[in-house]
Image (tube, helix red, strand yellow):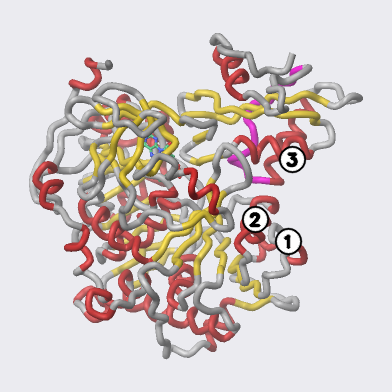
Amino acid sequence: MNEMIQKKVFPVTGEGYNMPAYEEAYKNFAWEDVEKQFSWHTTNKVNMAYEAIDRHVDTPLKNKTALYYSDASRDEQYTFEELKALSDKFGNVLRKYGIQKGDRVFVFMPRTPELYVSVLGTIKVGAIVGPLFEAFMEGAVRDRLEDSGAVAIITTPALLSRVPVSELPALKHVILFGEDGELAEGQISYEKEMEQASADFEIEWVDREDGLILHYTSGSTGKPKGILHVHNAMIQHYQTAKWVLDLQDSDVYWCTADPGWVTGTSYGIFGPWLNGATNVVRGGRFSPQDWYSTIEKYKVTVWYSAPTAFRMLMGAGDELVKQFDLASLRHVLSVGEPLNPEVVYWGMKVFAKRIHDTWWMTETGGQLICNYATMDVKPGSMGKPFPGIVAAIVDDEGNELPPNRMGNLAIKTGWPSMMRRVWNNPAKYEEYFRLEGWYVSGDSAYMDEDGYFWFQGRVDDVIMTAGERVGPFEVESKLVEHPAVAEAGVIGKPDPVRGEIIKAFIALRDGYEESEELLAEIRQFVKIGLAAHAAPREIEVRDKLPKTRSGKIMRRVLKAWELGLPTGDLSTMED
Ligand code: WT7
């Protein structure tokens, strides 16, 4: 299968990487050795924020820049010592309002230094942080705060209208950053509290298995799932950032993901700072000019981004690249969706760099299958399992399949950053482990003779649009809330730039006529109720949608319609 593709290889270039040659690294690796990096090795107590920030203050890294931040109106930098002091203060603010270990505290704000201080401060008091992407609208915010029983949220005046405070009885405190007017009852000013907060702070030492972060993510059915990660995940964050991102002392590292998604926390906060690297954060929207100038301005050396972004940069043309000095780049990586070989070839052409694909998921907490600096890269492949990780292709009974056979991509259970719970939903959690000894990813793939893994698709109906995971059920539920929509089925339609776009098939209620205005209104309705990235780019009206006898919309039939493919077995379809 795919023999031509499999044979194309970009060999290892240069030396001086953190990771030894792959085979050697894999053979000699033990997670127990990584643990020795951390304080719990002697005390049995730990805190992610201590390991990522505080401990560097007792080393020569103290005055090193931990964070470069810029947007259209701000241009700032913070040392490790400054970040420690700010997050200590914020920890005191939270304590003043009674927030303690195990409480859920959400952070809902644009990417600014205050977001990072809030996340770190929350972790310092032992609370569980729930980062929310700033594009979320009221419905998405409500679902997450309600499900997790959040007691506090840190947000901004602009986003406040999307937090339905009166409908959330557990939510006691709203901390507002950037409010200079009157505060309503229950509202707290971030700036005022920080001004008054004491600098003396005692960090909350927790157990390795205590909750750290709650990331909500979509499945094919039901509401978003709250994926809980624990402090123990730092073992994986540390080691993968060291070997996969190849972070070294002199690196200036830029992860383009927002902390509302797991990439923006595991590899936008924890991994790089555990390794003492300098993080670049650029606020504001994507633009090719701005991105290239960010690399030039900070002399970014390691860059972690996503296929959709690379494809958009590709679309902006090679001439643009030449207007910037990007010579600082030494290691480039990608995550989130399949990285097309064309993009890897383009990367070689314009940056003279291999783009290293990495595969993992919200649930896995950290990278699992990757292309490494010290390994040959096969464009189009996700690479090989990280040392300490056993990956395989298994059939639906859990039998391992031989090379070049497509099946379920599964991982032997028990890596350090594996999710520990689906919040409020043990049954959903168990579903991932239905095949004895395996974590079942929901992706299909095959492995070639050389042990490289090749992504084939999702097993379920989950949509990946511009690197963001969208559950069709959530979008369908929102669509049918609109008075004109009788039923709705949502699929991912292949798209050359975004990977997939969201396409909705709907049937209208009696009395409604299809018109461009109506479809635009429906689209807007989803955008306002859920999030811009969840709104269908295309809506097609049909008299009736294909359904099973039990009333479930048959998305695979919609997909076949869309792609002009045979519809397959229709035996369960209603007349
Ligand atoms: C799904 C997980 C973890 C970071 C961002 C996404 C898809 C992820 C790759 C890759 C092909 C990929 C999978 C996976 N995916 N990385 N390198 N090649 N597909 O996290 O939102 O939890 O989504 O993203 O389908 O299951 P997520």
* Quadrant of the image containing the C terminus: top right
User: Which residue carries the number 1 mark?
Assistant: 164
Q: Residue furthest right?
A: 511
Find the magenta span and give its range: 530-542
- Tag 1's secondary structure? loop
Is 538 inside the magenta-drawn segment?
A: yes
Residue 341: image location, x then y, percent = 30, 26
Q: Mark 1: give few (<14), some (14-19) or many (20+) Cα within 10 Å.
A: some
The answer to whether the beta carbon of the residue marked 1 is less than 8 Å from any atom of ligand 1 is no
- Identify which amino acid the numbered label 1 is placed on: Pro
Q: Which residue is found at the position 57% from the left and 37% from the top?
A: 220
Dividing the image into four quarters, tell me where ligand 1 lies: top left
Say the numbered circle drawn on residue 481: none
User: Which residue carries the number 3 mark?
Assistant: 525
- Identify which amino acid the numbered label 3 is placed on: Phe
Residue 319 in view: no
Mark 2 or mark 1, which is nearer the start of the sequence? Answer: 2
User: Which residue carries the number 2 mark?
Assistant: 141
